[in-house]
């Protein structure tokens, strides 16, 4: 694991260059260009707000649009990081087969690129809060810690999944379908309090649900997540990085012959 971290630090300039390249190429040729980074979550938020607020008439949450946006942004980071990251090694197979390219750079680039999109979307949430007169809580100061924890968690998952995907190409299709299922198991379009008591334990076991809940707590409720949740998420992050590093190291030598 430490060897992989050292390698990432060693190739930090390459990672920065690839992230910049990915960001510039993503919206090349489109009229609005980089504005789509802001418009995509806004459009999705609008759809969910109309459906759940006005069609289904879900009225259990005050300031539902802000509540929805608060959970949707970190979820979009999760889905984009995993769906883009799982195929990152396969998509750049030409680099790995032609040179001694450090393959662990590719998952890092995927997670960093989607992190930047997430960070650029946060000001929209804060502007909505200002417009609706919602106060900014002191617990916002803990937000960088949660973001860092989510980054480590996602990088470990992407490192493992992208390595496995080289051998088992079904992984990338499974990931997108599992994420659709997980979306409805996380308190994003509904509050955790609306989950029946007998099923509420599933939220405490689901790290994705804990992540979205933690954003709601820090930004909207002004409370810190329980210490048990912080320890559980930290354990998941460490476990993902350790397992991701082990899986990558195990499969790395076979990448060139399979790509």
Image (spheres, rainbow, N blue to C red):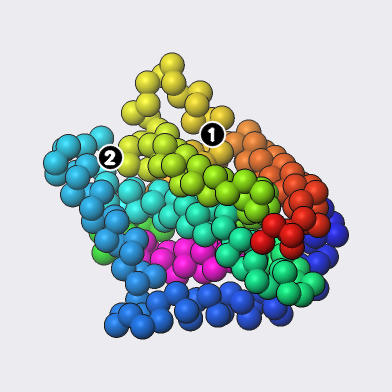
User: Farthest residue toward the front?
Assistant: 257
Q: Nearer the viewer, residue 127 or 259?
A: 259
Extent of the magenta region: 108-128
Q: Which mark is residue 206?
A: 1
Q: What residue sits 54% from the left and 68% below the top?
A: 113
In this rendering, the answer to whether 18 lies above or below 229 is below
Determine whether, in the image, residue 126 is placed left or right of residue 237. Answer: left
Q: Nearer the viewer, residue 95 or 236?
A: 95
Would you say residue 6 is visible in this rendering? yes
Determine whether, in the image, residue 161 is placed left or right of residue 177. Answer: right
Q: Is residue 231 magenta?
A: no
Judging from the image, what secondary structure is the residue with disc 2 in? loop
Q: Which mark is residue 173?
A: none
Disc on the earlier residue, 1 or 2: 2
Q: What residue sits 65% from the left and 71% below the top?
A: 94
Residue 180, horizontal then vertical, whole percent:
40, 42
User: Farthest residue toward the right?
Assistant: 3
Where is residue 145, by image quadrant?
bottom right
Q: What residue sits 25% from the left and 49% below the top?
A: 48
Callout 1: 10 Å neighbours few (<14), some, many (20+)?
Answer: some
Callout 1 touching callout 2 (CB < 8 Å): no
Residue 92, horizontal then vertical, whole percent:
62, 68
Would you say residue 138 is visible in this rendering? no
């Amino acid at each position: 694991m430490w060897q992989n971290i050292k390698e990432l630090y060693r190739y930090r300039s390459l990672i920065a260059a690839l992230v910049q390249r990915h960001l510039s190429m993503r919206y090349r040729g489109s009229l609005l260009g980089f504005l789509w980074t802001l418009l995509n979550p806004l459009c999705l938020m609008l759809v969910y707000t109309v459906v759940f607020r006005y069609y289904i008439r879900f009225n259990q949450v005050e300031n539902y649009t802000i509540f929805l946006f608060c959970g949707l942004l970190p979820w979009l980071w999760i889905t984009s990081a995993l769906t883009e990251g799982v195929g990152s090694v396969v998509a750049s197979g030409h680099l790995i087969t032609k040179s001694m390219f450090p393959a662990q750079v590719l998952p890092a680039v995927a997670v960093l690129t989607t992190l930047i999109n997430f960070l650029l979307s946060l000001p929209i949430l804060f502007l909505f809060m200002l417009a609706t007169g919602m106060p900014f809580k002191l617990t916002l100061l803990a937000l960088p810690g949660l973001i860092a924890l989510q980054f480590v968690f996602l990088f470990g998952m992407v490192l493992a999944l992208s390595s496995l995907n080289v051998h088992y190409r079904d992984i990338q299709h499974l990931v997108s379908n599992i994420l659709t299922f997980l979306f409805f198991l996380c308190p994003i379009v509904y509050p955790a309090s609306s989950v029946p008591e007998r099923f509420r334990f599933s939220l405490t076991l689901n790290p994705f649900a804990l992540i979205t809940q933690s954003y709601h707590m820090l930004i909207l409720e002004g409370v810190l997540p329980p210490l048990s949740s912080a320890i559980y998420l930290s354990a998941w992050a460490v476990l993902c990085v350790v397992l991701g590093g082990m899986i990558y190291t195990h499969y790395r030598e076979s990448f060139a012959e399979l790509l």
